[in-house]
Image (cartoon, rainbow, N blue to C red):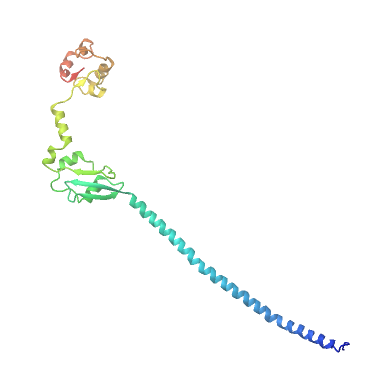
């Protein structure tokens, strides 16, 4: 069948049908190609995500490292510095834990030396006492150190020149320590204050004259 200009419509229709059949036959391969593209795309996406995971692990390790550094800093800040001197084997400045005792400081210094005054140390040093930052710990030596010990000097002065007890100001415990006074008489002395003379203790019948004779050299107004 031909048109007025000699155009063959039958041939055109036949070619369109051939193209249609060709496309119908090619639909299955095209679908496979699309499926392949999807699989390849999924593989690329998975590979990219896999590379990101190690970065997250690195961050976690970094955080752990920072925590470790923080713990080390805290441990360092919990140290104290003390000066150990006197009758020890290795006198020096030492770094100890903040809850350390005098015994710990002595151990760091190698223990007591042969010149240590053991009697004086046992009386004046509490080895269980906690030490503080910047503290100086001195262990007395024999001979010369003893004469310079302030505690011993004070004790000697107290023995040779005991202080007298004031009737108007002394505490209950001080009055009770006087010979022949006791708890009741100490309370009576306090209740009858003030006193104008020591003999008021007798005239007011607070204590008997025999007790007054015992304490008159130990009391003042």
Residue 130, relative to residue 56: is it above or below?
A: above
- Percent coordinates x, y for residue 64 in the rendering: 42, 59
Left or right, 118 with reference to 18: left
Q: Nearer the viewer, residue 63 or 16?
A: 16
The answer to which quarter of the image holds residue 9 is bottom right
Q: Looking at the image, which residue sits at the far left?
A: 143
- Quarter holding residue 159: top left
Q: Position of residue 189 (x, y in %)?
A: 25, 17
In the rendered image, the quadrant that contains the C terminus is: top left
Split into 4 quadrants, where in the image is the N terminus? bottom right
Question: Residue 204 versus residue 91: which sits nearer the camera?
Answer: 91
Residue 192 or 73: which is nearer the viewer? Answer: 73
Residue lying at the far top in this picture: please name it: 203
Kindly give the residue lying farthest to the front in the view shown: 5
Q: Residue at x 27, y 50 (%)?
A: 95
Where in the figure is residue 107, as x and y percent of width and height? 22, 50
Instruction: Pinpoint residue 188: horizontal percent, then vertical percent.
Output: 26, 16
- The answer to whether 202 is drawn above or below residue 164 in the figure is above
Count of marks overlaid on the render? 0
Residue 88's place in the image compared with 203, above or below, is below
- The extreme right residue here reads 4
Image position of 110 (left or right of 64): left
Q: Judge whether 110 appears above or below 122 on screen.
A: below
């Amino acid at each position: 069948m031909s048109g007025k200009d000699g155009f063959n419509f039958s041939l055109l229709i036949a070619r369109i049908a051939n193209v249609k059949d060709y496309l119908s036959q090619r639909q299955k391969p095209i679908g496979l190609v699309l499926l392949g593209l999807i699989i390849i795309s999924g593989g690329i996406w998975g590979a990219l995500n896999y590379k990101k995971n190690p970065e997250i692990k690195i961050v976690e390790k970094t955080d752990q490292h920072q925590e470790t550094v923080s713990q080390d800093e805290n441990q360092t800040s919990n140290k104290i510095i003390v000066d150990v001197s006197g009758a020890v084997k290795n006198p020096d400045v030492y770094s100890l834990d903040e809850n350390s005792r005098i015994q710990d400081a002595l151990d760091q210094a190698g223990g007591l030396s042969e010149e240590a005054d053991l009697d004086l140390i046992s009386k004046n040093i509490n080895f269980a006492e906690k030490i503080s930052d910047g503290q100086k710990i001195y262990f007395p030596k024999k001979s010369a150190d003893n004469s310079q010990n302030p505690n011993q000097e004070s004790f000697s002065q107290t023995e040779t020149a005991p202080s007298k007890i004031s009737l108007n100001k002394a505490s209950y415990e001080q009055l009770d320590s006087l010979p022949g006074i006791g708890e009741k008489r100490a309370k009576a002395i306090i209740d009858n204050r003030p006193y104008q003379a020591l003999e008021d203790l007798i005239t007011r019948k607070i204590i008997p004259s025999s007790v007054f004779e015992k304490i008159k050299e130990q009391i003042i107004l």
